[in-house]
Image: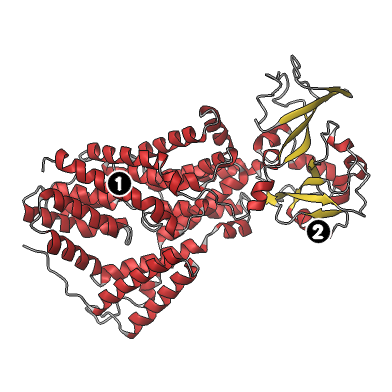
């Protein structure tokens, strides 16, 4: 008995036209994605208002309320909340220590570190919900990428793909798997067992993991920063000094081959001052003592790193407030670093940082000095400043914002960046762990846990409200809302079922079992990237069972085929929630998912088409 075939309707064809037009606009990119999405959504609302699709009670099934529901969709709220939580973790440097551990374990090899992490993500995703697993590792990989000067776009999409691949290996690995099993039971068949499809799933996951480790990075953007001048500038060397405090972890450290291993590999010690005596490299058998002043050369990125914070290069809030005196910088203020040039005709040239009393005069500290003309081994505060010297300044947002008004300094354009508020890292980490635990144990729906976590991050000062709002990518908001509207239209108009029946039954009915299985897999892959993977699982499981019965094949085989194919949500950002999570941190465009995701989907399809007939003895 065939499934009832839907006759094509006006609304169905109009929906197909909208889907095709939007994909063309996304790939073409002559219009901003936000504009293309808003235009498509607006025209859809107008068309379905003028020519409504009536339901049994004569209500319009595709009215404005239905089509705009995507803006309040729980999946979108979850993604936006997790983006804010992730940005708070980055802003506080909460996971920088994890990045250092991974750096040490991998021996400084980014490829090795990523391979370890992605393999671990795949294994974890087999037994945990994919979304919290990806949420955990986004800030870790961002911190590791920053530590190793690696492009975040090279690892964010592979992270999502690794979680998806791991999720298809066990019954609880993905909600899609559970829906297929439930649909099978609703049709009167035995549900899938926990490890019923694990052998095939592991084969597909292993092939996919090899692709994302070795080939996927070649297809992804090499740069994500929109501020390339700042990125290039961050690698320039600054002279700074580091005083060994009484409780410093550097006390007693002995250099190896002239290098202090407790410091970053990007730090060069030029001279050590001990009681007014200069000690030059290689510092053999010279353990550090309290009061030693290390004159170092390093980058601005290293100077704002957590290790430099622990070593006292960046003072604590209490120390800074004491230096400023009553009415000084409040401990709750956020900090920035900025580069400023000593201006000609000002009051800085010919003076030293110490004599100018920089903190009292300008409200900020000098972290580093850059002078290209010659090597300097003097203490930074005793160096006589010259016109053209670049100073790396540290202060509150308000102080940094006021520096352009100083006639003594010329602030370099777009050089200001936020300094991680390390003192708030524990509270940020506590909120993050709480969100993960609440979601993983189902004590709260993930959307509620994520929204609560994002709100707490702002209230506890882990991230400023303005920074939280800036972290939200409105391109992502419009992509999700418009795609959900199109997915709803495809389901309500019967477009998805119509295409599935026409292709599967009209073109492939009567073909051999292997061809039917392969064709069914391919059709489901296409639809799972256009509508939600869960909707795809519910829609195609009955169709697969019907085809299996007509062809005399075990329905469980087609159910498992639907399961694997519905999980292949690699080709679009809206294919799976984890794709949306990594879209912002990776600064991806829609076409980036097509470039990297389509080959992976094809690879999984081909692998399944070759292995499944042998595995299932078809």
Asked if residue 450 is positioned above or below residue 56 in the image, the reply reads above
Residue 99, x across and y down, in percent? 55, 36
Q: Give the CA distance from mark 1 to mark 2.
A: 55 Å
Pick the residue in front: 489 or 153.
153
Instruction: State whether residue 185 appears in this view.
Output: no
Disc 1 target residue: 603
**Residue of label 2:** 404
In the displayed structure, does residue 154 sit left or right of residue 58?
A: right
Question: Does residue 386 appear to the left or right of 470 in the view shown?
Answer: right
**Given the current orientation, which residue lies at the most extreme bottom position?**
50
Rendered-image quadrant of the N terminus:
bottom left
Locate residue 404, reporting x and y percent: 81, 58
On the image, which quarter does residue 414 sit in? Answer: bottom right
What label does residue 364 carry, if any?
none
Can you name the residue that lies furthest to the top here?
Answer: 285
Q: How many marks?
A: 2
- Residue 74 image point, x, y percent: 41, 60
Nearer-the-camera pick, 329 or 15:
15
């Amino acid at each position: 008995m065939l499934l009832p075939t839907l006759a094509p309707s006006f609304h169905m064809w109009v929906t197909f036209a909208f889907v095709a037009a939007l994909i063309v606009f996304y790939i073409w990119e002559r219009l901003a994605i936000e504009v293309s999405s808003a235009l498509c959504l607006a025209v859809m609302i107008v068309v379905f208002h003028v020519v409504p699709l009536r339901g049994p009670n004569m209500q319009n099934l595709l009215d404005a309320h239905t089509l705009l529901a995507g803006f309040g969709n729980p999946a979108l709220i979850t993604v936006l909340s997790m983006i804010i939580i992730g940005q708070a973790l980055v802003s506080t440097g909460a996971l920088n220590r994890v990045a250092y551990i991974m750096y040490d374990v991998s021996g400084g090899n980014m490829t090795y570190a990523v391979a370890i992490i992605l393999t671990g993500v795949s294994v974890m995703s087999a037994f945990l919900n994919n979304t919290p697993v990806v949420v955990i590792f986004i800030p870790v990989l961002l911190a590791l990428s920053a530590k190793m000067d690696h492009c975040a776009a090279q690892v964010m999409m592979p992270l999502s793909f690794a979680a998806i691949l791991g999720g298809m290996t066990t019954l609880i690995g993905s909600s899609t798997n559970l829906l297929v099993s439930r649909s099978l039971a609703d049709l009167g068949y035995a549900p899938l067992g926990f490890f019923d499809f694990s052998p095939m799933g592991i084969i597909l996951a292993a092939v996919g993991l090899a692709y994302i480790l070795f080939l996927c990075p070649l297809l992804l953007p090499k740069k994500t920063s929109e501020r390339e001048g700042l990125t290039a500038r961050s690698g320039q060397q600054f002279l700074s000094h580091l005083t060994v405090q009484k409780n410093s972890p550097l006390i007693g450290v002995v250099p190896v081959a002239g290098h202090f291993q407790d410091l970053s590999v990007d730090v060069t010690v030029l001279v050590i001052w001990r009681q007014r005596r200069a000690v030059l490299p290689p510092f053999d058998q010279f353990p550090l003592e309290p009061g030693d002043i290390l004159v170092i050369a390093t980058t601005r990125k290293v100077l704002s790193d957590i290790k430099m914070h622990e070593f006292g290069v960046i003072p604590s809030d209490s120390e800074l407030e004491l230096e400023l005196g009553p009415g000084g910088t409040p401990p709750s203020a956020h900090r920035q670093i900025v580069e400023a040039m000593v201006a000609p005709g000002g009051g800085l040239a010919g003076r030293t940082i110490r004599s100018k009393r920089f903190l009292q005069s300008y409200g900020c500290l000098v972290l580093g000095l850059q002078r290209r003309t010659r090597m300097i081994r003097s203490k930074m505060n005793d160096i006589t400043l010259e016109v053209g010297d670049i100073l790396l300044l540290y202060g509150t947002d308000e102080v940094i914002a006021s520096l352009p008004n100083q006639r003594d300094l010329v602030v370099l354009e777009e050089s200001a960046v936020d300094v991680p508020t390390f003192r708030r890292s524990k509270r940020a980490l506590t909120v993050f762990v709480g969100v993960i635990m609440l979601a993983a144990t189902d004590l709260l729906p993930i959307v509620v846990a994520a929204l609560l976590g994002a709100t707490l991050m702002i209230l506890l000062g882990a991230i400023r409200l303005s920074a939280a709002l800036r972290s939200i990518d409105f391109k992502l908001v419009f992509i999700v809302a418009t795609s959900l509207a199109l997915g709803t239209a495809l389901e309500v108009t019967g477009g998805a079922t119509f295409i599935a029946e026409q292709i599967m039954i009209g073109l492939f009915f009567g073909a051999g079992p292997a061809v039917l299985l392969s064709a069914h897999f391919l059709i489901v892959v296409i639809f799972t990237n256009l509508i939600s993977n869960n909707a795809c699982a519910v829609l195609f499981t009955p169709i697969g069972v019907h085809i299996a019965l007509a062809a005399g094949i075990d329905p469980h085989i087609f159910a498992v085929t639907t399961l694997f194919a519905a999980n292949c949500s690699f080709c679009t950002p809206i294919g799976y929630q984890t794709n949306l999570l990594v879209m912002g941190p990776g600064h991806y465009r829609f076409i980036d998912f097509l470039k990297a995701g389509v080959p992976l989907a094809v690879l999984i399809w081909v692998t399944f088409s070759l292995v499944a007939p042998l595995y299932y003895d078809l």
